[in-house]
Amino acid sequence: MAGLTNASNLRATVAPQRKILPNLTAARIFAAAWVLIYHAGDENRISRQAHWYHSWIDGGYLGVSFFFVLSGFILVYNAPAILNPRKFYILRFARIYPLYVVSLLCCFPNFLTHSTGPHLRIIGVDLLLIQIWFSSIYRSAINGPAWSLCAEAFFYLSFPLLLTPLRKSMQHWKLLLVVLAVLAILPASAAHIWLWHTGLRESAGMIDVLAWPLFRLCEFAIGMILGLLFISRQSVISGRTTALALLLSLATVGLLPYIPYEVMRCGVLALPFGFLVYCLAGWKSNILASPPMQLLGEISYGVYLLQTPLALLIGKLVHWGPQLNTILFITILPVSYLFYLVVEKPGRRIILHLFGVRSHPKPIQTPDPATP
């Protein structure tokens, strides 16, 4: 893996000064847009002809895997030397919960009209961010894409428990990455081998179990390890190496027609995406660091969470005609920016004020990552 340090250089896994990593902020909008395009193409996915480029369109759900790896990387990078779990949990709650609840509220009218499941129970598990632990009826009943927030909540709970052991084990980072990469795909691979052996093509119950956050934790942990690795050196990565990392990720996505869906989803991209995140963190890009790209990265959370409620609203106005996706693509950015201003930022401030918590000090702005 180009640009990575040797084990002898991994003495410090907590950087004394954190530098802004603007590329990682900008990268979020590409992952969110990828997921959006995937969901917008649901209606035509089965009927259309399979062209060579459809692997990259139909693989948009893998943007969630990118977010999981990126989340582990960023949380490690921003973690103080001594983590206060209470403060950490409050900061993460303030970050994700205000817009999450508002997105559920926006979907409630459609849910109450069309859902046949136990309404109160579904609402309860969604508000508690535990819907992914139940069947798909619960997972997609209100705001389908929000299931990944349930997985993120589990990762946040696990983070303080994982951080210290991983920091102490970084002299074996190569072995850790290999083990986690294998563990990431092992449950889904074993399930598909068993289904093939028994003559079954798929099992709804098995798919529900494989969606549990426990089976996605390895992707998050891979991001953590690569984040610790990056902290130890603050590597400067060339544009050529970053392009190689991007091509490796795209090539792996190109395997989509040949790998079972659940296996592909559960960790196949963890290492390629981790390599890409590592390279983006250490590569200087004036375009990605520009104010417009940084703003798009900041509102990417809204692009991800608000796509369903906005599509439902547009669908009522245009009766789910062919122009729905066009209107959705045009309006999603301004709507996400509006909710960023009136929901995300104020909600975060209110929660932090109620709990008497102050954010971590802002990273130091530097023109580019520099080797210590």
Image: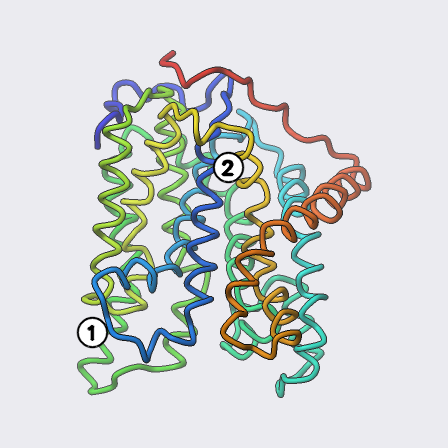
Q: Disc 1 designates what residue? A: 193
Q: Earlier in the sequence, mark 1 or mark 2?
A: 2
> Residue 355 bears which disc, if any?
none
Which quarter of the rendered picture does the C terminus lie within?
top left
Q: Mark 1: which secondary structure?
A: helix
Rendered location of residue 61, percent (x, y): 40, 61
Amino acid at pointer 1: Ile
**Residue at 82% of width from left, 41% of height from top?**
354
Quarter of the figure with residue 9: top left
Figure quadrant of residue 254: bottom left
Which of the labelled discs sits on residue 75, or is there none? 2
Q: Nearer the viewer, residue 363 or 303?
A: 303
Camera-nearest residue between 42 and 78: 42
In the image, residue 223 above or below residue 202 = above
> What color scheme is it?
rainbow
Label 2 crowd (10 A; few <14 / some 14-19 / many >=20): many
Q: Residue at x 57, y 32 (%)?
A: 83
Question: Residue at position x 56%, y 22% from top?
Answer: 363
Depth check: give the residue in front, 320 or 201: 320
Where's residue 172, x and y in %? 27, 33
Q: Amino acid at mark 2?
A: Leu
Q: Secondary structure at mark 2?
A: helix
Quarter of the image with the N terminus is: top left
Q: Is residue 222 left or right of residue 287?
A: left
- The reply to whether callout 1 and callout 2 are in contact (CB within 8 Å) is no
Number of labels in the image equals: 2
Residue located 63% across and 28% down the image: 360
Give the answer, above or below, for where 17 lies relative to 222.
above
- The CA span between labels 1 and 2 is 35 Å
Percent x, y for residue 126? Answer: 64, 67
